């Protein structure tokens, strides 16, 4: 059993608005399929695009999905799944509310996503150091409330990444 899927059981998905026009009741199953995906086609079939967002415009469900991603990033995942989760997380923290969400009283979904993503702050820094540097950097730029810490890490890691790129 995965901690992220236990977290999914705690959420009232039926009450959340989804980008597909339905309730978000189907999201836990889609998320579980994404975590178990092993091929590019399985990952594509389990995408959260069109559910958490449409063209970077976020729906209410993005907040709950952000908490699942924060938990899942601490789990053992295939590389391609990890990249997909980081990509979805960046969408959640850097997007903005869909106009229908603004009308429904949720004008800053991205702020709530940023707060939820902070649960994984050190995992994101670990990704920046050893994994998917640029994706993690972009996410951290949006979510780390300690800008002095971010600037310090960024200065040190950006120069290291640039040096490594020149060697290759």
Image (cartoon, helix red, strand yellow):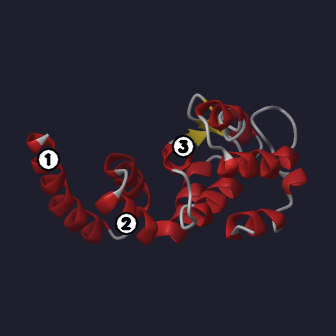
In the image, residue 114 sits, relative to residue 52, either above or below, namely below
Asked if labels 2 and 3 touch by Cβ distance under 8 angstroms, the answer is: no
Mark 3 surroundings within 10 Å by alpha-carbon count, few (fewer than 14), some (14 through 19), many (20 or more):
some
- Answer yes or no: is residue 93 visible: no
Q: CA distance from mark 3 to mark 2?
A: 17 Å
Pick the front one: 104 or 122? 122
Q: Would you name the residue on which mark 3 appears?
A: 84
Secondary element type, mark 2: helix
Q: Position of residue 63 (x, y in %)?
A: 66, 55
Q: Position of residue 66 (x, y in %)?
A: 62, 56
In the image, residue 121 sits, relative to residue 96, either above or below, namely below
Q: Earlier in the sequence, mark 1 or mark 2?
A: 2
Q: Earlier in the sequence, mark 3 or mark 1?
A: 3
Task: Determine which of the numbered discs, if any, sits on residue 162 in the image.
Answer: 1
Q: Position of residue 80 (x, y in %)?
A: 51, 43
In the image, residue 69 sits, relative to residue 165, either above or below, namely below
Asked if labels 2 and 1 touch by Cβ distance under 8 angstroms, the answer is: no
In the image, residue 53 sits, relative to residue 10, either above or below, namely above
Q: CA distance from mark 1 to mark 2?
A: 18 Å
Identify the residue shown where x is 87% and y is 36%: 22
Left or right, 167 with reference to 24:
left
Secondary element type, mark 3: helix
Q: Would you name the residue on which mark 2 appears?
A: 126
Identify the residue shown where x is 70% and y is 42%: 59
Pick the front one: 27 or 82? 82
- Occupied quadrant, residue 153: bottom left
Q: CA distance from mark 3 to mark 1?
A: 24 Å
Pick the front one: 25 or 110? 25
């Amino acid at each position: 059993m995965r901690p992220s899927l236990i977290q999914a059981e705690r959420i009232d998905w039926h009450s959340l608005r989804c980008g597909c026009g339905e309730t978000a009741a189907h999201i836990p199953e889609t998320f579980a399929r994404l975590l178990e995906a092993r091929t590019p086609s399985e990952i594509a079939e389990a995408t959260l695009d069109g559910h958490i967002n449409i063209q970077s415009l976020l729906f209410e469900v993005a907040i709950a999905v952000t908490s699942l991603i924060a938990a899942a990033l601490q789990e053992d995942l295939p590389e391609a799944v990890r990249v997909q989760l980081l990509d979805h997380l960046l969408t959640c923290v850097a997007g903005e509310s869909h106009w229908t969400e603004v009308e429904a009283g949720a004008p800053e979904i991205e702020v709530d996503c940023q707060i939820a993503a902070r649960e994984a702050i050190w995992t994101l820094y670990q990704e920046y150091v050893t994994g998917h540097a640029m994706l993690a950097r972009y996410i951290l730029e949006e979510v780390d409330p300690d800008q002095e810490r971010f600037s310090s890490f960024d200065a040190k890691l950006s120069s290291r990444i640039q040096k490594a790129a020149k060697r290759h």
